[in-house]
Image: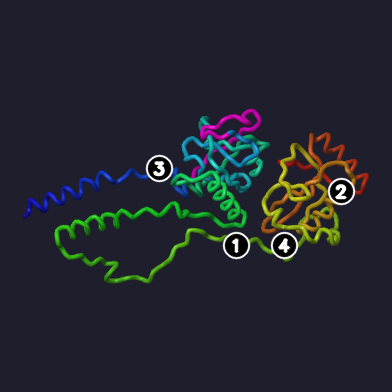
Amino acid sequence: MRTIRFLLLFILLVPLKLSVAPLEPSYNRVGYKQRGEASYYAEQFHGRKTASGEKFDMNALTAAHPRIRFHSLLRVTNLRNNQSVIVRINDRGPYKDGRIIDLSKAAAAKIDMIRYGVAPVQLEVIYVETGPITDRERKENEERIRKQEEKGIRIGPTPQEPPAEPEKDRRSSILERIRRLLGKPKEKQESEQHTPPQQTETTEREMPAPPKQEQQPPVQENKPQPAPHASDRSADAATFAGINTYTLDGTIRYPEGFGVQIGSYNKLEAALQVGHHVEQTRLANVYIQTGWVGTVRIFRVLVGEGTPEQARELAAKLKARGFNGFLKQHY
């Protein structure tokens, strides 16, 4: 009888030992964080093939990392200004000491590091593909996560990533299977004798929404806010929800060099109305740059792009038309 029990134990434990897969590297798990320097690459690599097989697009929000799994989504935060961007890994690199990630030009612009070239950052893995999916499903996942990020929702483990079974529970499960094979009764666990109230855990946490714009005072306006025109009252604030530079119709742009800031407003309608007035001068393109000052949402009106000398000439022309302003670098 003892021989039979020993053989049963041997037959059961040997495959269990062999079937225990090595743990996934920590950098391929949701929640992994890393700090270091970020750089970016742009025109000279635009259109070239990346390590994942895709063509590099400097205008897409992608990045290169030495080892994180392709198509993982990362939140990259510039530690100089606390601005963040969500990027998808589709390439390998950088390979210079101290550098932990190479961003596309568009991603670098999102966190205001173009002027520096290199910036201290923290990256955090927020999504990892755990199985084969179609390109369409990948794109839908990415869009969903980006929208949640814009709304202030922090992403936790996805349904594709079930939490790993704790080591203690795994051992208990193995021992219970052995007891059943040997015909022994199940032992009562402490958790069965004294069952505590159940607690639920959430995988997503909604951050407090920014204060409503109507409740905030104006922020350092250069001139009195005009009353919103009827044609501007229908402006869709959701179109200007990110921290970007937009055209007056809400298209994201990345203007180069310097422009002329002629106003800063805490209401989108006021900024758009002033922007349309300046647009009528036909002196240069007009942009709305969004951002925060503390807890106050602001909308800056910027005109033109170019060298500091060109911006000074533009400022003089705008002043002649009644619009006072000052030079401001776009990124």
Q: Quadrant of residue 111?
A: top right
In the rendered structure, which amino acid carries the disc numbered 4?
Gln
What separation in Å lies between label 2 and label 1 (alpha carbons)? 36 Å
Q: Secondary structure at mark 2?
A: helix
Q: Residues within 10 Å of mark 2 (few under 14, many from 20)?
A: many
Q: Is residue 98 visible?
A: no
Q: Secondary structure at mark 1?
A: loop
Q: Sequence order check: which comes first, mark 3 or mark 2?
A: 3
What separation in Å lies between label 1 and label 4 (alpha carbons)? 14 Å
Q: Residues within 10 Å of mark 1 (few under 14, many from 20)?
A: few
Query: Residue beneath label 2, please?
Result: 278
- Residue 102 x %, y %: 57, 36
Residue drawn at x 59%, y 57% is 152
Q: Sequence order check: which comes first, mark 1 or mark 4?
A: 1
Q: Secondary structure at mark 4?
A: helix
Query: Residue beneath label 1, please?
Result: 208
Q: Would you place residue 69 above or below residue 275 in this image?
A: above
Q: Quadrant of residue 239?
A: bottom right
Query: Residue beneath label 3, please?
Result: 25
Residues at discs 1 and 3 in contact (Cβ within 8 Å)? no
Residues at discs 3 and 2 in contact (Cβ within 8 Å)? no
**In the rendered structure, does residue 38 fall within the stretch colored magenta?**
yes
Tell me, for residue 213, which label it has, or none.
4
What separation in Å lies between label 3 and label 2 (alpha carbons)? 55 Å
Q: Sequence order check: which comes first, mark 1 or mark 3?
A: 3
Q: Which segment is the magenta one?
A: 33-54
